[in-house]
Amino acid sequence: MSALATTIQTSIVLEVLATEIKEIKEIKGVQIGKEEVKLSLFVDDMILYLENPKDSTRKLLELINEFGKVTGYKINTQKLTEFLYTNNERSEREIREAILFTIASKRIKYLRANLPKETKDLYSENYKTLMTEIKDDTNRWKDIPCSWIRRVNIIRITLLPKAIYRFSAIPIKLPRAFFTESNKIF
């Protein structure tokens, strides 16, 4: 079976699991306005937003095990990573002991994007690093003898996809300094 077929098949199976997660009341999502949000799906990946991680995770693991028995798909719980938001040390300790997942302290790398624990760090974790990548690439190409057309094609093929992906994956308001700095490079 091709990689594409496997990815599509996994996506379909994951959609069934996602539907089941949404239906189970014991798995509590986070409240955003009037809506309870439990998860986001990206091809064959899933991000969960859990309100009560200790109880919700227990129910989630039961569901994952049952789901694996029924479908034949095994979800590697060793690869599961989470952020933990709490303002109570005792509660945090209890949750850490109860949950088998890896708990990230600062960031999770997900689909080539850095997801920091604090949303205020999205710019520095993703766009400052993009700017560094662009500077490094353009400095490396400085001494390559080629026409302007070829340089435009190099940028179009290598830099533009990185930038477009970052803009679409992490749609945040960028400071004017980002664009000023970009203009200086080119």
Image: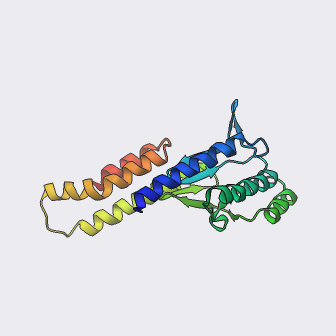
Q: How is the image coloured?
A: rainbow
Q: Position of residue 153 (x, y in %)?
A: 20, 55
Say which residue appears at 25% left-offset and 53% top-offset.
156
Residue for point 68% across, 47% down: 49
The answer to which of 122 and 82 lies nearer the viewer is 82
Q: Quadrant of residue 29?
A: top right
* Residue 101 quadrant: bottom right
For residue 115, above or below residue 15: below
Q: Position of residue 123 (x, y in %)?
A: 51, 51
Picture residue at 62% right of the left edge, 56% below the top: 71
Give 73 or 179, whichever is nearer the viewer.
73
Q: Quadrant of the N terminus?
A: bottom left
Q: Residue at x 72, y 53 (%)?
A: 63
Residue 182 pos. (x, y %): 35, 51
Q: Is residue 38 visible?
A: no
Say which of 180 and 31 sits in front. Answer: 31
